[in-house]
Amino acid sequence: MGMSSLKLLKYVLFFFNLLFWFCGCCILGFGIYFLVHNNLGVLFHNLPALTLGNVLVIVGSIIMVVAFLGCMGSIKENKCLLMSLRKSVADGLTDSIQRYHSDNSTRAAWDSIQRFLQCCGINGTRDWTTVVPASCPSDAQVKGCYEKATVWFESNFLYIGIITICVCVIQVLGMSFALTLNCQIDKTSQSLGL
């Protein structure tokens, strides 16, 4: 492999990592936004730290760090940097239904979900032991949010799958470029006697 193709590979790898770094920044930004404007609330009280904001902050931070190391490893040609759930969900949702009237963040979360999915409770209006919330549709045959969420994910599965496959392909290309660059660094080091 010639020196010009090695330089091209180095900059392509840098560009891919820079793109992932920007994506990580966006995910981190959304996570911070959701932490500040906590309008979704907490659905799983047995895991109170597992909020959308916290998950996005963690994922965004990890993506940013890995992409930054990839950028630095490719530009500096540093080899070290280049290599460097159903029953539990139902239990958590049942617990959050019991906290609906006593916790404002839980109420906000359930109201948002029920309005968005046009559903009521986990399995229907019978999940609400006292008063059915105003966010539930007035239809007597309304379906539960668990079933509606499952249908929503199944109906959007193709789009979710396409996005996932595209990200995986880009990641595999990035790893291939990193390994190729790593091999070229080894060859160059051996030819220079380092």
Image (spheres, helix red, strand yellow):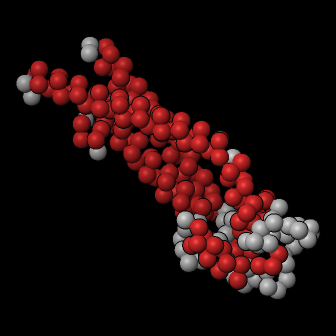
Q: Nearer the viewer, residue 91 or 52?
A: 91
The quadrant in which residue 37 appears is bottom right
At 23% from the left and 28% from the top, the residue drawn is 183
Which residue is outermost to the left?
193
* Residue 68 drawn above or below residue 134: above
Provide residue 41's location: percent of width, then percent of height: 67, 69
At 81% from the left and 79% from the top, the residue drawn is 126
Is residue 140 at all visible to an observer of this figure? Answer: yes
* Residue 139 drawn above or below residue 152: below
At 38% from the left and 25% from the top, the residue drawn is 11
Q: Nearer the viewer, residue 129 or 47?
A: 129
Quadrant (top left, top right, bottom left, bottom right) of the C terminus: top left
Quadrant (top left, top right, bottom left, bottom right) of the N terminus: top left
* Residue 32 drawn above or below residue 107: above
Is residue 44 at all visible to an observer of this figure? Answer: no
Q: Is residue 92 left or right of residue 112?
A: left
Provide residue 75's location: percent of width, then percent of height: 32, 30
Provide residue 83's location: percent of width, then percent of height: 28, 41
Q: Nearer the viewer, residue 163 or 60?
A: 163
At 41% from the left and 25% from the top, the residue drawn is 12
Please tell me how many numbered marks the rendered image carries: 0
The quadrant in which residue 100 appears is bottom right
* Residue 17 drawn above or below residue 154: above
Q: Is residue 139 left or right of residue 42?
A: right
Q: Nearer the viewer, residue 173 or 148?
A: 148
Provide residue 29's location: percent of width, then percent of height: 57, 51
Q: Is residue 150 left or right of residue 178?
A: right
